[in-house]
Amino acid sequence: MNEITATSLSIALVGALATWIAFGPLSGYILIWAVFIAWAGFAALGGDNHALKSTVVCGVFGVIIGWIAAFIVLTVPLADTLGMPLWSAIVVGITAFTVVFASNFQIFGAVPASVLSYAATFAYLLQTNERMSLATLTNINFENPLLLISLSVIFGGLFGKISVVGATYMTKEA
C-alpha cells in the first residue's frame, strides 16, 4: 500500500478508536478535541519517538502554565482595578512569555506542543459552562484541566504514535 493511503487508513482507524474511547469508556476523562489537538502536535513535531516524548512533556507543561494563568486571573484581585479584559491580557502575556522562554531548556523545547495545550486549557475553561472557576481549578477530579486536558494530551500523543506504527506496518511489502 502506498504511504498516503496507509497513513490515511491508519489515522481513520485509530481516530475512530480514539473517538469511541473518548465517548465510551473514558467519557469524562479525556476530551476528543484535545486528543486530536495533541495528536496534530505530535505529527507536526515529526511523528517519531522524540515527538511523542515532546508532545507529552511540553503538552502537560502547557496545561500547567495555562492552569497557573487561570488561577492568577481568578485569585489576584486586579480585575477590579484594571478590568477583566486588561488583567487577563497581562496574565496571558506573562504566561505566554514563560511558555516560549522555557524552551531555553531542552526538555521544554517543543513550543508548538506547549502552546497548543495552553490554548486547549483555556478553550476548555472558557468554552465549557461554569469551568472558569476556582472550584474547577482546585478540585481533584476530572473537571480540573490539570487532569482532564493533561490526560487528553497524553492520549493524543499515544494515538498519534499508534497511527504511525499502523501506517508503517501497512506500507511494508510482504
Image (tube, helix red, strand yellow):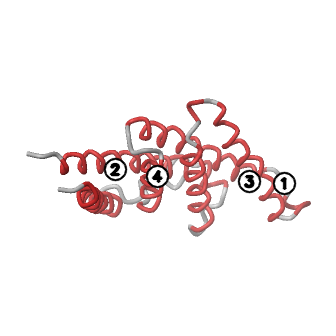
Q: Which residue type does callout 2 highlight?
A: Phe
Q: CA distance from mark 4 to mark 2?
A: 9 Å
Q: Which residue is mark 2?
A: 159
Q: Are discs 1 and 3 less than 8 Å apart at CB? A: no
| 42, above or below 34, in the image | above
Q: Residue furthest right?
A: 81
Q: Residue at x 63, y 54 (%)?
A: 135
> In the figure, residue 84 lies in which quadrant?
bottom right
Q: Are discs 4 and 2 less than 8 Å apart at CB? A: no
SS assignment at label 2: helix
Q: Nearer the viewer, residue 127 or 5?
A: 5
Which of the two labelled residues, at mark 2 and mark 1, occupies the earlier sequence position?
A: 1
Which of the two labelled residues, at mark 4 and mark 2, occupies the earlier sequence position?
A: 4
Q: CA distance from mark 4 to mark 1?
A: 33 Å
> In the figure, residue 10 lies in which quadrant?
bottom left
- Disc 2 crowd, CA 10 A, few/some/many (<14, 14-19, 20+): many
- Disc 1 crowd, CA 10 A, few/some/many (<14, 14-19, 20+): few
Observer-side mark, 2 or 1, equals: 2
Q: Residue 92 got which mark? A: 3
User: On the rendered image, what quadrant is the N terminus found in?
Assistant: bottom left
Q: CA distance from mark 1 to mark 3?
A: 15 Å
Q: Which residue type does callout 1 highlight?
A: Pro
Q: Which residue type does callout 4 highlight?
A: Ala
